[in-house]
Amino acid sequence: PNHPEHASPMQRTDGGLNAMAGDDFQYSLGPPDSGFSLFLAERTKKIHFIRHAEGFHNVETKKTGSNECLLREGKPANQHPLWDARLTPTGIAQAKALKKHLAKRPSGGRSFTAFDLVVVSPLTRTCETAYHIFGDGRQPGKPAFLCEGVAPEGSIEHERGDKVPAPRILVREECRERWGQYVCDGRRNISEIMSEFPSFDFSEVPYEEDRFYTENGREPDEHTCARGLAFLQWLNRRPEKCIAVVTHSSFLRHIFQQFGGNLHNDDMDRLQRLAGNCELRSIVMCSHGNRDGQEIPPMTAAAPRSTVRVDSFAHSLDKLGTEDGPRCSTASLLGNITE
């Protein structure tokens, strides 16, 4: 759903996007209660979370005013017209607008934003969103230095003829939407989706069919929270420093509600509020280093898979429906959030 705009001193572009202008900042660890967070630069990385653009299921829920249109109504979920819902023409336009925005958004010493890695949920609407923003991904297994990508047209780098390799676009089940009950949150077989996105890397998706979706109940909140933390653990271990994640609103909410307890109220609200369609929300993630060596077991539908635990999941779950409640974690998500 659409949400009220929030005033911000950050750069704004047509379509209501906010962005960090010049995000080559660094952090390291300071005294408590100072109002600052300092972290060693080598332990930080920028994660740019993007919610998928408008899908047909979003249109239907707005039209009817409820989620009842997303129920299977006694039929197999995969026979519903909104099963693994696609983007609308408006959604495609939203993704293309974000692509233009990133082409003019300074980052990392360039006049545009380029990514080392794009991680995508396997659902069709996220794959479509990623494709319309980033285009074809780098061929799986091909090193970046052999890629013949070019900088965005109109940029200084393009005029110089700089080579900018396309990012690897990696599909991971861990960042899919909270599954179950609603037909839009199941996915088609991977072989069908792969045929539409041949430049995406599906090699780390474990199953052809959707073994996680359940027709009669939602993924438990606690499971989704733990899955979100485990996904952050996985991101933390990646060698890339600038990563985009194309994912879903409820999944993001289950991550962000576990962080931000020491932020100013305005920043906490901007971090934790529900994301709009094709919203870009950029954060700096810092590992404290005390759990980096812990094993991350494979994702399952049966139990939370994170080895990072917040002090009380009950507090995080309460926060999903309330305005206050403590949040605690062993990693930090730092400000500079974009709307």
Image (cartoon, rainbow, N blue to C red):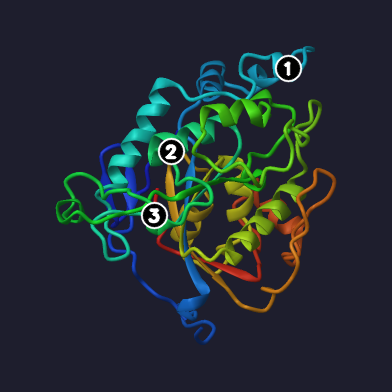
Q: Earlier in the sequence, mark 2 or mark 3?
A: 3
Residue visible at 46% across and 56% down?
Answer: 143
Q: Which mark is residue 72?
A: 1
SS at circle 2: loop
The three-letter amino acid code for the residue at tag 3 is Leu
Q: Quadrant of residue 77?
A: top right
Q: Quadrant of residue 279?
A: top left
Count of all numbered marks drawn on residues in the image? 3
Mark 2: few, some, or many residues within 10 Å (few <14, many ≥20)? many
The three-letter amino acid code for the residue at tag 2 is Cys
Q: CA distance from mark 1 to mark 2?
A: 26 Å
Residue visible at 64% across and 44% down?
Answer: 203
**Residue 337, x across and y down, in percent:** 42, 57
Determine if residue 292 is in view: yes
Residue visible at 58% across and 31% down?
Answer: 194
Compared across the picture, whether 63 is left or right of 156 comes to right
Between circles 3 and 1, the one closer to the viewer is 3
Q: CA distance from mark 2 to mark 3?
A: 31 Å
Instruction: Pick the residue in front: 129 or 224.
Output: 129
Instruction: Pick the residue in front: 321 or 153.
Output: 153
Mark 1: few, some, or many residues within 10 Å (few <14, many ≥20)? many
Mark 3: few, some, or many residues within 10 Å (few <14, many ≥20)? few
The three-letter amino acid code for the residue at tag 1 is Arg
Compared across the picture, whether 303 is left or right of 130 comes to right
Q: Which mark is residue 90?
A: none
Q: Residue furthest bottom?
A: 31
Residue at mark 3: 146
Residue at mark 2: 278
**Residue 318, x across and y down, in percent:** 70, 51
> Is the C-beta separation of discs 1 and 2 under 8 Å?
no
**Residue 311, x across and y down, in percent:** 74, 67
Q: Earlier in the sequence, mark 1 or mark 2?
A: 1
